[in-house]
Amino acid sequence: METDLVLAIAHHFAVFLLAAVLAVEFVLIRPGLAKGDLALLANVDRAYGGLAVLIILIGIGRVLFGLKGWEYYVYYWAFWAKMAAFAAVGLLTVPPTMRILRWRSQAAATSGYVVPESEIAGLRGYLKGQVVCFALILVFAATMARGVGY
Ligand code: HEM
């Protein structure tokens, strides 16, 4: 009971923090993005990756040590739908992370570097995709917790 509660609390803290970090990325990745904010953005992006790893570890903990037992989840489509949506968010973070690293090295090499607007627009598309998949995760999480369609 206690382990399940602690894991559930940690899971909620981590996923809300992840949502906050995604929102910060949305605010920072906008026209006019330059050196100072690029350094902040790179740190925020690292935090995003770290939180994702933490959520996976806590999530596995919930599957293994949660009240329902692991068998409940591994034979349940809603669990795998949630995992697929989570994996999709992960895949959609790859191009932005690579781009942010490239922008940082370009900013280090060029004084007064400002990220071109066309690249900003492209990256915001990936962020929007992440928001949609994140919303799907929440839908499948609530479905899975209630055993709907089991
Ligand atoms: C960004 C990613 C994630 C989000 C936003 C998220 C969100 C949630 C939410 C809101 C709940 C509570 C559902 C409810 O009680 O109505 C939940 C429960 C749970 N999540 Fe996640 N989750 C994420 C990732 C993961 C991962 C990666 C795993 C497993 C590897 C996982 C495993 C679980 C488990 C086992 C429960 C308990 C469901 C139950 O009560 O039966 N989650 N999740």
Image (cartoon, rainbow, N blue to C red):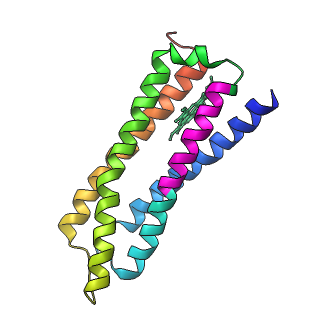
Image quarter hosting the N terminus: top right
Q: Residue at x 57, y 14 (%)?
A: 147
Question: How far across and how far down the image is residue 72, in percent?
Answer: 59, 14
Q: Residue at x 21, y 70 (%)?
A: 117
Q: Residue at x 30, y 60 (%)?
A: 98
Question: How far across and how far down the image is residue 12, in percent?
Answer: 64, 41
Instruction: Establish if 121 lies above or below 93.
Output: below
Can residue 30 be seen by looking at this rendering? no
Can residue 6 be seen by looking at this rendering? yes
- Left or right: 71, with 66 as reference point: left
Q: Residue at x 49, y 10 (%)?
A: 149
Name of the residue lying farthest toward the bottom: 111
Question: Which region shows up in magenta?
Answer: 48-64
The rendered magenta stretch, by its main secondary structure, is classed as helix
Instruction: Establish if 59 lies above or below 111.
Output: above
- Left or right: 110, with 42 as reference point: left
Foreground of the two, 117 or 103: 103
Foreground of the two, 20 or 54: 54
The magenta stretch spans residue 55: yes
Question: How far across and how far down the image is residue 5, in percent?
Answer: 76, 33
Instruction: Establish if 126 lies above or below 145.
Output: below
The magenta stretch spans residue 146: no
Which quarter of the rendered image does ligand 1 occupy?
top right
- Left or right: 78, with 89 as reference point: right
Name of the residue lying farthest toward the top: 150
